[in-house]
Amino acid sequence: MNINNVGVVGAGTMGNGIAHVFSLFNFNVTLVDIRQDILDRALKNIKSNMTRQLNKGHIDNDKLVESFNRINSSINIRDLSHCDLIIEAIKEDLNLKSNLFRDLNSICSKNTILASNTSSISINELSKSTKTPENVIGMHFMNPAPVMKLVEVINGTNTGKGTTRCVMEIAKTIDKIPIECNDSPGFVSNRILMPMINEAAYCYQEKIATVESIDSIMKLGMGHPMGPLTLADLIGIDVCVHILNVLYKDFKNDKYKPCKLLADMVNQEKLGKKTGEGFYKYEL
């Protein structure tokens, strides 16, 4: 399938990062969200991040201007009707995502690939809301999307081989490394990562070590580029708790039950970098 026009639904951190990446590689991008102020903020972030790339010598000014101008924004989902590939990056809520996929399926071509950037929700469940489950796939970018190389490509039971091939090739085109897995709670990345973050939180809750010590031990001893508690702050404590709850619910195994400390942090709105405080404090 010839992919020229890419839609991204959800202009938050992941959505604007994904839009940014595709625009740099000559794709026409339509970024959609429910409010114009969210879109304005997203475009400001994209411009800022592209300027950072310019200052580091990764792109020149012509590339910045051309790429930024390839991104159109809209509050009307129907403006995605011409897209060949649509990537959903909205709130991790099965009902919201299912309703979105149903609406997209009704306004787009029967050949449009509907991909989800979900970090935990079943691709099979999402495909049930469409008439073309063979076109539904997971395309899980890592944060920050313009920097991280991995795209976890999640095949549902009914995902067509042609859809998978196309998404794998598109990921390579935007200079990512796509790796396939099959639909399962948390897929591979978060099924392994979230229990580690959970155990790190338990280590701190039980006063085994300080936050800094826990992170340093995992960096220096295990070769991790950042510690698990720093990573939790980057991902968002609320997102971590949500994914753990999905794993706990689906596997019915206590090893996935969120640490009380994480749940308390969510209640206190200490969600990490995005709120200015999590395990560490940040300037907003």
Image: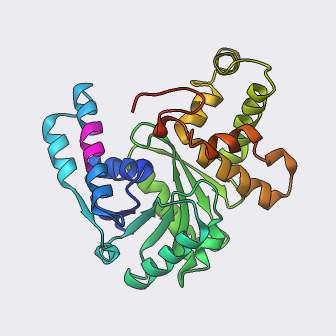
Compare residues 212 and 73 and report the one nearer the observer. 212
When the figure is inspected, residue 213 is found, relative to residue 183, above or below; the finding is: above
Residue 278, percent from left and from top: 57, 33
Residue 275, percent from left and from top: 48, 39
Compare residues 198 and 142 and report the one nearer the observer. 198
When the figure is inspected, residue 107 is found, relative to residue 121, above or below; the finding is: below
Residue 176, percent from left and from top: 45, 44
Q: Which residue is drawn at 68% across and 53% down?
A: 186
When the figure is inspected, residue 234 is found, relative to residue 189, above or below; the finding is: above
Q: Which residue is drawn at 76% across and 29% down?
A: 205
Q: Residue at x 36, y 67 (%)?
A: 34
Q: Residue at x 54, y 81 (%)?
A: 130
Image quadrant in which the N terminus is located: bottom left
In screen coordinates, is 265 left or right of 72? Answer: right
Main SS, magenta region, reads helix
Magenta span: 43-49
Image quadrant in which the C terminus is located: top left
Name the residue at the front extreme.
268
Q: Can residue 193 be seen in this view?
A: no
In screen coordinates, is 107 left or right of 133? Answer: left
Compare residues 22 and 267 and report the one nearer the observer. 267
For residue 128, what is the image quadrant?
bottom right
Say if the magenta span includes residue 28. no
Residue 156, percent from left and from top: 64, 67
